[in-house]
Image (cartoon, rainbow, N blue to C red):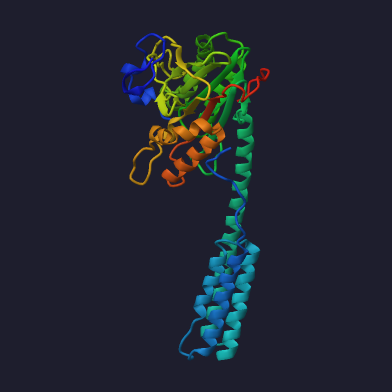
Amino acid sequence: MRGAGGRLRGTGGGEGWRQDTPRRLRYAFYVHPFRRDHAPRPSRRWLLAVPFALIAAVTVVDVLVPPEVHLGPFLIAAPAVTASFAGPRTTALVGAVAVVAQTVVALARTSVTDLNHTYQIVALVLISVIATFFAHLRERDEKRMARLRSIAHAAQSVVLPPLPERAGPLRIASVYLAAEEEAQVGGDLFAAARTASGTRLLIGDARGKGLDAISEASLVLGAFRVTARREPGLRELVGRLEAGVGPAERARGAAADGVDEAFVTALVLDVPDHEPVVRLVNCGHPPPLLIGRGRVTPLEGTGTGPPLGLSDVLAADVTVETFPFAAGDVLLLHTDGVTEARDRSRAFYPLTERLAAWAAAAAQDDPAALLERLRADLLTYAGGRLGDDAALVAVRRATAGTGRPVPPPAPSG
């Protein structure tokens, strides 16, 4: 049924944990990656024209101007500029050409043994050597960063593989947007698993950043993959997730900073194949958005519980909410890296308003097209860089005759 403000209320009971809980824990603190398109860098060979043109111009002008005018020191800029984009060999070559040019100027004007030209040549040689050394360091760091990106990509494919495009009557698309340019995987997570009667979905956000967040996300994903098909109901599934995650999270949090605050927000959903509903358990996560009938509705129930890992701290019963999810409707699951993205004026990204403007088109688009539009708009809004990792999952229930049932595959994450 529908509550105030146009928000759908679930059929689950209980006032829920969220009512009296601070926002910090309610939504916690919350890269594939559509975040970065890791395309090869455009060729920089054309940039070599800049130092060589500079050398030629300085040489010609220095020979033609009166003797009291000395332009030779400007040749230092050639190897210095080259070191910013080229390798050590190219930088050394440009430096050598600059030294030859300085020698030509000296011979044309006086002599190489003239102290003024001698000092200029010596200084140019020293600067060229230093620039070549820094070009070597930069190239070494770039190769190291490329290896790290390759490792991150491999880790992502293992920890967070793409969701299946089809699961029974559902069409699914996922996006991972990394806040850090060097990383492709972090604490945000999603997974899907087929059961005998439908599809179960998980989206979550592990507290913290870096390796700790990746470790926590892997723990939740592993527990979900093991238990998603075994447990008969969402209440039991969430209980298994808490049992597997809670002790490890508390131990890690206490060991890290002495404060028992390690937790993972999560949203666990069950979408039956033959019922036009979605059942969900919200563990301190932003509510999903239902796009259908030309409007966008947050699925906020009355029984939002604490994040995984905090059930002992904030005791609450697990409440299963039920919402309508008809053929043609789209569910958008997201982490708060989306809604907390800011523009230059520090205003938050208006996700619901953006989706409302696209509601009519979203009903016709496939989930991948919707997420691509949302990804592009989000990055444009945030100036191309997010302050936090963000994950998005779009699920569309196919209309009659648009999809064919598939046998339950192994859980995918």
Q: Nearer the viewer, residue 73 or 358?
A: 358
In the displayed structure, does residue 150 sit left or right of residue 261? Answer: right
Q: Is residue 78 above or below residue 70?
A: above
Q: Nearer the viewer, residue 288 or 50?
A: 288
Residue drawn at x 49%, y 25% as measured from the top left: 331
Q: Is residue 227 above or below residue 352?
A: above
- Percent x, y for residue 319? 43, 11
- Percent x, y for residue 110? 56, 91
- Percent x, y for residue 259? 40, 23
Residue 329 visible at all: yes
Q: Nearer the viewer, residue 266 or 61?
A: 266
- Percent x, y for residue 373? 50, 40
Seen as rendered, the residue at the extreme front is 401
Locate the C terminus by quadrant: top right
Q: Nearer the viewer, residue 281 or 352?
A: 352
Q: How many numbered marks, from 0 up?
A: 0
Residue 382 visible at all: no
Locate the N terminus by quadrant: top left
Residue drawn at x 41%, y 16% as measured from the top left: 305
In the displayed structure, does residue 2 sit left or right of residue 47? Answer: left
Q: Is residue 191 above or below residue 150?
A: above
